[in-house]
Image (cartoon, coloured by chain):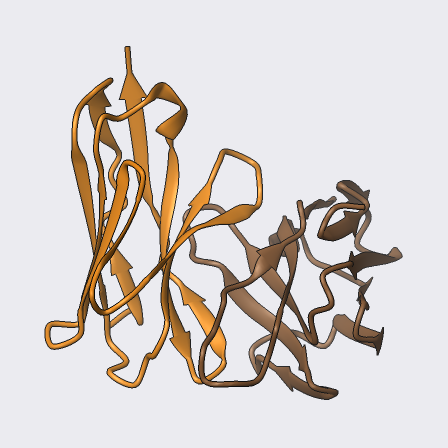
Amino acid sequence: ETGVTQTPRHLVMGMTNKKSLKCEQHLGHNAMYWYKQSAKKPLELMFVYSLEERVENNSVPSRFSPECPNSSHLFLHLHTLQPEDSALYLCASSHAGGSVHYGYTFGSGTRLTVV
Amino acid sequence: RKEVEQDPGPFNVPEGATVAFNCTYSNSASQSFFWYRQDCRKEPKLLMSVYSSGNEDGRFTAQLNRASQYISLLIRDSKLSDSATYLCVVTRVKELVFGTGTRLLVSP
């Protein structure tokens, strides 16, 4: 099993659909993240689950809903998306806590197209 | 002002050249610093952490200047396989903040 696994790799959905992105990490990390990457923009943090605490970027629309049932699994539920939501969605995990940050390990991402 | 600023490039260099990227950050409270590499349509991958004393990993050397709040990455003897986007990353409390990246193209 690779470190961080994301499914699906590609997703095309209509604006009225409901879909979910899945992420699983096998690294023993205790924090997981959702990032959005649009063309020519920096990675945008959407949600963090760290040490059983959820932190969210207040600018993320409510049509994106995260779920983290345990420290190894993370979902992003999508509903009534807009074309501007088309982007690469990246899951990451890390070890949280302590004074030193060791960086994130990213999954391979889901390339989402909203039509 | 962006929290992390990078020259987007592209930097076009021939094989064997030495190339340097700089990055500035605005949050003086940032404690950890990294360079990530991202290939086209792939996920970012950690290239190296950046320590106050500077650190080297093979052909790659990273430097941190806390007083001026900038980070650099030097690549010696460039290879074709070094062509990618290099992301400068700093911490904001416990989260990572990414720059938009600098694109490097190494040509034969």
Query: What residue is at 49 percent from the left and 67 percent from the top?
Result: A102
Left or right of residue A67: residue B17: left
At a point 41% along the width and 80% down the height, the residue shown is: B92
- Rendered position, A64 above or below A55: above
Q: Toward which corner of the image does residue B98 lie, by quadrant?
A: bottom left
The residue lying toward the viewer, choosing from A50 and A37, is A50
A37 w.r.t. B64: above or below: above
* Residue B99 against residue A68 in the figure, above or below: above
Q: Is residue B24 left or right of residue A89?
A: left
Q: Position of residue A36 (x, y in %)?
A: 58, 59
Residue A47 percent location from the top left of the image: 64, 75
Q: Quick one: which residue is furthest to the top in this view?
A: B108
Q: Is residue B81 left or right of residue A109?
A: left
Q: Residue at x 64, y 77 (%)?
A: A48
User: Which is more toward the observer, B40 or A27?
Assistant: A27
**In the picture, residue B64 is in which quadrant?**
bottom left
Colour for chain A in the figure: brown
* Left or right: residue B74 compared with residue A16: left
Chain B rendered in what hue? orange
As drawn, the residue found furthest toward the bottom would be A53
Q: Nearer the viewer, residue A55 or A104?
A: A104
Residue at (52, 48) in percent of width and height: B44
Q: How many circles with numbers are drawn on the protein?
A: 0
Q: Quadrant of the C terminus of chain A?
A: top right
Report the front residue among A35 and A71.
Answer: A71
